[in-house]
Image (cartoon, rainbow, N blue to C red):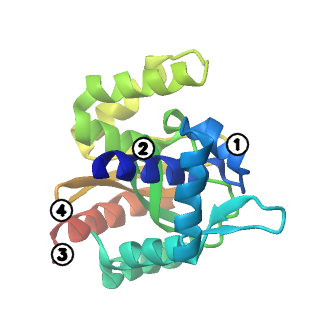
Amino acid sequence: MKSLLTEKIFHLTDQLIRAGRPLSLTELSRRSGIERSACWRIVSDLCSLGYLVRTKSRKIEPGLGMVYWGQAACSRTFFNSRAIKRIARVSDRLRVPAALAGLFQNQLVYLYRDAKTQQEFFRFPLRRSNLALAILVRKYGRDGALDRLRRDAEDAGEPFSPGCFLPRIADLEKNGYALETAKKGCNLAFPVERKNEVFGLAFFGVTPDDQKITDLIVRGTLLKNMLESEE
């Protein structure tokens, strides 16, 4: 019974987070598949504990309790503050935005992202993320990565073309990084293994003809090795 209740709590809060906006109790019940009365009891308990809050329009959104959990986990888990500061220093020195992320339920979870970037990235699709590709290939291999990218495209009702991923997968397997070149700018991503988990380190927004790319490859490789080995 406890495990079923726990599953409902996490499923309900996950749906609220994924929505990216406050939800009414009816919407939350429909999205989560949890009947309205059970949904009301869970929401009431979480609101009384400060993990959820009700807006003026009686809708529900994450509370400070969830923010506290997130900040505590982000600051103490996987990478210490010294490692995050090193990423920021390399980013500032080369004037190139950087990001560090992992994957949770096919969603990129950012542990660091350059604050100067205003792009909406919370629900960025896996199939359009070079950083996600670096993680998937290291974690599941070539075929496993392509299978997950295919399912991501199918779930969105989009066609899937493996050919656009194969050159970058080959670079990952040979050189340890993936370089995506586009008109909007290049994205250089490295897989980072730490504490039995695979993360991705990326530098992005570099113009294709910028000589910084070579420097980024060198500095990014050194930074990746440091992140993997530092206690």
Which x, y percent locates residue 97? 55, 65
> Mark 3 belongs to which amino acid?
Glu
Please identify the quarter of the rendering in which residue 146 is found: top left
Residue that mark 3 sits on: 230
Q: Name the residue located 44 percent from the left edge and 81 percent from the top edge.
A: 89
Q: Is residue 108 left or right of residue 142?
A: right
Q: Distance between the residues labelled 3 and 4?
A: 11 Å
Which x, y percent locates residue 67? 53, 74
> Mark 4 belongs to which amino acid?
Lys
Q: Which mark is residue 27?
A: 1
Residue that mark 2 sits on: 132
Between 197 and 34, the one nearer to me in the picture: 34
Residue that mark 4 sits on: 195
Between 71 and 138, the one nearer to me in the picture: 71
Where the C terminus falls, by quadrant? Answer: bottom left
First reached walking from the N terminus: tag 2 or tag 4: 2
Q: Which element type, helix, strand or loop, lies under badge 2?
A: helix
Q: How far apart are marks 1 and 3 (CA)?
A: 45 Å
First reached walking from the N terminus: tag 3 or tag 4: 4
Please identify the quarter of the rendering in which residue 125 is found: top right
